[in-house]
Amino acid sequence: MAATSARASAPARSTKTAAAAAARRLAEIRRVADLLKQVSDPTRLQVLLLLEEKERNVTELCADLGTQSQPAVSHHLALLRHGRLIEPRRSGKHNFYALTEGGRELAAVVRTIVA
């Protein structure tokens, strides 16, 4: 009888393992979808590529982007920061922004597509 119940619980375990793997995969897909939403705007893509070159502050980014106002650039930076693609570093009165590891990886992918 014990051997029968052991055999019956093995399929239940593999079903639970498969369900857990499917849940992890779905969570990862959602995370990637959220990440792609973060860079779905052309300005945010430009910011990502500019920060791939070197860290910059808002004033430098405004100058490099040309037509974007400081509040607009700050808004884009906030969204990228919320998505953990960039991180600020305070220096005196200015925040300098640089890519996180995830931001560098995404910028590299974007660079291959744009190039």
Image (cartoon, rainbow, N blue to C red):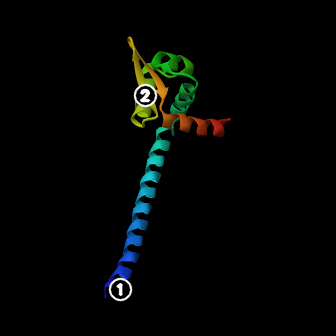
- Give coordinates of residue 90: x percent, y percent: 39, 18
- Give coordinates of residue 41: x percent, y percent: 51, 36
Q: Earlier in the sequence, mark 1 or mark 2?
A: 1
Decide: is 25 above or below 69.
Answer: below
Tell me which residue sits at (48%, 25%) in the image.
Answer: 98
Q: Residues within 10 Å of mark 1 (few under 14, many from 20)?
A: few
- Give coordinates of residue 61: x percent, y percent: 51, 20
Q: Residue 4: which numbered mark, if any?
A: 1
Q: Amino acid at mark 1?
A: Thr
Decide: is 115 above or below 97.
Answer: below
User: Which residue in the protein does label 2 denote?
Assistant: 87
Decide: is 34 above or below 95.
Answer: below
Q: Disc 1 on helix, strand or loop?
A: helix
Corner quadrant of residue 11: bottom left
Q: Disc 2 on helix, strand or loop?
A: strand
Marks 1,2: beta carbons within 8 A: no
Q: CA distance from mark 1 to mark 2?
A: 57 Å
Q: Which of label 1 and label 2 is nearer to you?
A: 1
Image quadrant in which the N terminus is located: bottom left
Q: How many marks?
A: 2
Instruction: From the viewer's side, name the closer residue of 77 and 88.
Output: 88
- Residue placed furthest toward the right: 115
Tell me which residue sits at (47%, 53%) in the image.
Answer: 29
Corner quadrant of residue 94: top left
Q: Residues within 10 Å of mark 2 (few under 14, many from 20)?
A: some
Q: Amino acid at mark 2?
A: Glu
Q: Is residue 39 left or right of residue 1?
A: right
- Residue placed furthest toward the top: 92
Q: Residue 84: which numbered mark, if any?
A: none
- Residue placed furthest toward the front: 2
Tell me which residue sits at (57%, 29%) in the image.
Answer: 49
- Residue placed furthest toward the bottom: 1
